[in-house]
Image (spheres, helix red, strand yellow):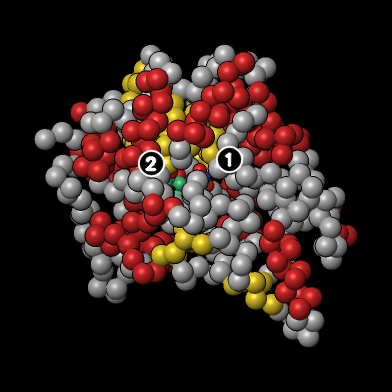
Amino acid sequence: MKCVDDFRLVLGNKDYVPIMIGGMGVDISTSELALVAARLGGIGHISDAMVHDVSDRKFDTTFVKDKAKTYKFNINNLDKSLVKFDMARLAEATINHVRSTMEAKKGDGLIFVNCMEKLTMNGPRETLRTRLSSALDGGIDGITLSAGLHLNSLGLIAEHPRFRDAKLGIIVSSARALQLFLRKNARLDRLPDYIIVEGPLAGGHLGFGMDWAEYDLHAIMDEVHAFLRDEQLSIPVIAAGGIFTGTDAVGFLEKGAGGVQVATRFTITHECGLPADVKQEYAKASEDDITVNGISPTGYPMRMLKSTPAIGSGIRPGCESYGYLLDGNGNCSYIDAYNREVLAHPEQRTVTVMDKTCLCTHMRNFNCWTCGHYTYRLKDTTHKKADGSYQLLTAEHVFKDYQFSVDNRIALPPREE
Ligand SMILES: Cc1cc2nc3c(=O)[nH]c(=O)nc-3n(C[C@H](O)[C@H](O)[C@H](O)COP(=O)(O)O)c2cc1C
C-alpha cells in the first residue's frame, strides 16, 4: 500500500515531498508553520495579506498606526477613495516579512507566498505590482497567485530579474479559469511552474458560487489534466481542498497529481497563528457548526464557523487603518451595508450588519473563523484532555502523518502530561 512519501513533486530540476501547506491569511499560516514544511522537504506558504499589520506585530514597525494617523481626518467620511497605500511602505513591510522568513529557512523544501488578487487595496495594479516584486526582492522561493483570475499579474513583474527563476503558480477552481490565465499570459512566454486546483471543500474563500456542493475535486482535477494533455503542456497539478488523510492524498497522487495542498489539519498546531482559544473552537466544531455564506465583501463565498464573531458585527469600517478590500474606486460592499444600517437606525449607537462583514478588521483580530469543510474531523486527530480542551499538535506531527500514513489512519500524538 502506497503512502505520500512514495511520490515526489518535481519543480524544475529538483524534487520535493509532495505536500504544500496552503497560505492562510492573515498570518494564520505563520513563518513558523511554513518553515516546518520547508525543513521536512515540502513546501510551506506565508501570506502577504495585511502585511503592514504582520510587520508591526513581528518587527515593531508602526505602519498601521501611521496610516491611521494620516487618514484620521477621513474617519467619518463615507467616501474612502482618498485612503491610499504608500508603495514604499508596502514594499518595506513585505520585505520585512519575506526576508525574515527566508533567513530562517532550513532544509531542502521551499517557501512560497500566497498573494490574493482580491486584496485590491484601493489601487489594484500598483499595489499588486509592489507586493509581487517586493516578495521577489525579499528572496521568496515562489509566489502562489490566489483569490482571483490574475489575468494581468504576471505582466506586472515580467521585467523583474527573478521573473524566470522564482517559482510562480496559480490557484484555479476550473479548467476554464486556467485556460483564461494561460491565454492571457501567452505573450510573456512564461508558463506557471505549478497549478493548484482548489475544490469546494477548502477553507477561506471559494472559487465557486453558492452551488459549491455540486462540484467535486476529483472531477475538476480530471478536467484540468485533460486540458493540459490537449494543450501538450506538462505542468504539475496540485490538488487542494478536503484532503484530510495521507490516503486521501495518495488517491490524487495515483491519478497523476504532482502534489497536494492542505491547510485545515494545521489549524490546531502550535505553529498556526490563530489564538489558542480560537484553535479550541476549531477543534471542538461539529459538522453543523460550519457554514458557507456570502458575508465576505470580496464577493466570493467563504466557509466559516457559525459562531464566528464576524457574523452580524456592525463595527465601523476600519479603512483608514486597513482598507485592503477597497476596490479601485475606494468602495467596499461592507461600507455600503454598514451605512445602510446606520441610516436605517439613527437612534441606535451600534448596528447589526448581517449580509456583509468588515473582513479586514475581523481577520486582523482573528475574529473571522474561516475553516475547511472537514474542520469537524479535527477532534479525531488529537486527544481530549481532562479539562475538556483539545491537545494541540506539532506541525511536524501533522506533516509526517500526511507523509507516511496508510489505510486512512490518522496518527494520534503522544499524550501530553
Ligand atoms: C483558516 C484558513 C485560512 C485560509 N486562508 C487562505 C488565504 O488567505 N488565501 C488562500 O489562497 N487560501 C486560503 N485558505 C485555503 C488553503 O490555503 C488551502 O488551499 C485549503 O484550505 C486546503 O484545503 P483543506 O483546508 O481542506 O486542507 C485558507 C484555509 C484555511 C483553513
Secondary structure at numbered mark 1:
loop
Residue at the image point whose x is 17% and y is 49% from the top: 409
Which residue was labeled with disc 1? 148
Residue at the image point whose x is 72% and y is 50% from the top: 326
Q: Residue furthest bottom?
A: 347
Q: Quadrant of residue 121?
A: top right
Label 2 beta carbon within 8 A of ligand 1: yes
| Relative side of 22 to 379, left or right | right
Residue 389, x across and y down, in percent: 32, 69
Q: Residue furthest right?
A: 73
362 vs 55, nearest the viewer: 362
Residue 80, x across and y down, in percent: 81, 55
Mark 2 and mark 1 residues within 8 Å of each other at the beta carbon: no
Residue at the image point whose x is 58% and y is 62% from the top: 295
- The residue type indicated by label 2 comes to Ala
| Relative side of 111 to 397, left or right | right
User: Which labelled disc corresponds to residue 240?
Assistant: 2
Secondary structure at numbered mark 2:
strand
Q: Earlier in the sequence, mark 2 or mark 1?
A: 1
